[in-house]
Amino acid sequence: MEPHGTPTGAMREITDRALDTAASAGADYADVRVVRRVEESVTVRTGRVESIASDESQGVGVRVFAYGAWGFAATHRYDADAIDRAADEAVRLAKGAAPSLRHRVSLAERPRAYGTYATPVREDPFALPLEVKVADLLDADAALAVPGVVSTASTYAAQREWKTFAATDGSLTEQVFTHVGAGIEAHAVKGSEHQRRSYPEARGGRWQQAGYEFIRELDLKGNAARCGEEAVALLSAPPCPEGPATVVIDPSQLYLQIHESCGHATELDRVFGAEASYAGTSFLTADLLDSRFRYGSDLVTLVADATVPGGPGSFGWDDEGVAAQRTTLVENGILTGYLTSRDTAPRIGRESGGTVRAESWNRLPLVRMTNVNLVPVPGMSLQDIVADTDDGLYLTQNRSWSIDDRRWNFQFGTEIAYEIKGGRLGRILKNPVYSGITPEFWRSCDAVADERSYVMYGNPNCAKGLPPQCVQVGHGTSGARFRGVRMGAGR
């Protein structure tokens, strides 16, 4: 598996040893992941290189199903003794956990997993000289520094992961993932007021499963001056008006709305209470599936799709060996599915949707988002939706977010709002904040843009579990319009 992959033969000794030891110790089923990961990042602040960092990690994680329970153990060593100890420990932990189970665990069947997957990469980010990446950030950062901007930041990062998966059912897969991301931001200050404008996305930039060609396509330098100018202009802009309003939400904000109010809400382990101690449960309880619960309007169809080329949450197989697939979560506004695993799916009478991943070799795989996307609706472009809006607000770029433990009540702030009058974008407004109740908000959707404005955004830091695990997830959306949204002005 190139680039820089580890030959299958070298991994087979490790995986075979772990699986044989686990089976001998009493495991009914076992799987093993051998993972190596490298990362690099560069940060430029206000014209100076602030940091250049790199990291590497590798190890083996052994998961077993024994005595009706899961057990997991890991080691950073590849020698036989270390592998044996990890496999034995996993079985011992499963045996210890079994008496405390509230529900009998059963595993959904799946076909034997076998094959390879690799991110298509045209320009290898790890082969590119560091000087080139630093120079690109310095150029973008310099272009941010328009009059009135007091500080700037430009960031770049890349991750590559090699993963070999094997299981006692004969499964064996090898995958190589390459993720890259970059972004810029300008800060303007006047007295006690601070304004920020970001591109192409706040919170660390936009990520994709790709090579450095994706960073070039973002054109950070070409979008920098506008970023800086809008940060300065926001200082003297009027505040966003309060009260109900029609809002058109740009993909750069709507993707996070999808992430927080649909993606997390449809994680089936969360629905069953397994996530309650960290980030809450979900209002989308399993009984709502049979009752055809109306999550949104007829225009709202949301899917979890791990097959999207370049999607941050795409793969060949998940960390249970389930093949990548497309699962409908909400169809024409009706709840139709969840993000599932081999042990949660049987509880609702289904097969696993292939949405289980772990942050690293030393973490137990969990139900995670893949690419949770709002499906475009043919007919109107995002520009057409604006032109069709007589009086409203256009919201873009996330600034803040808050959502309750059940994913029911939420509040989001965006960096900027543009007034819509007579179907045209007008003056800018500062500190826009909107809030709502998740199903009421999605039911108020009366327009979804077509594929012409469809963009895939990535979140490299989606956290879940204890200890917390962060994985890459994606969200594709084309933008949409919502009626009667509660608006206000923050600080």
Image (cartoon, rainbow, N blue to C red):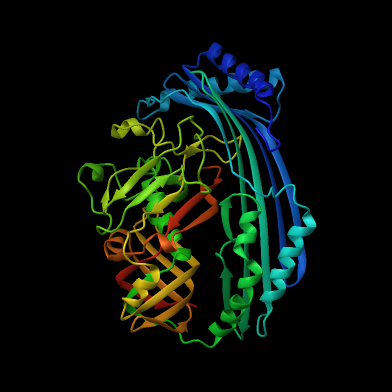
Q: State the residue in front, 247 or 21.
A: 247
Give coordinates of residue 58: x percent, y percent: 68, 35
Instruction: Give the x, y percent position of residue 154.
Output: 67, 66
Q: Nearer the viewer, residue 69 or 166?
A: 166
Q: Quadrant of residue 221?
A: bottom right
**Residue 482 on image: x %, y %:** 32, 68
**Vertical arrangement, residue 413 with respect to residue 292, above or below:** below
Residue at 29% of width from left, 45% of height from top? 285
Residue plotted at (41% across, 66% down): 411
Taking depth in this image into account, of 483 and 128 the one nearest to the observer is 128
Height in image: 5 above or below 421? above
Which residue is at a point 64% across and 55% down the rendered structure image?
213
In this orientation, which residue lies closer to the viewer: 386 or 64? Answer: 386
Q: Quadrant of residue 290?
A: top left
Q: Is residue 191 left or right of residue 126?
A: left
When the figure is inspected, residue 324 is found, relative to residue 486, above or below; the finding is above
Residue drawn 31% across and 43% down? 337
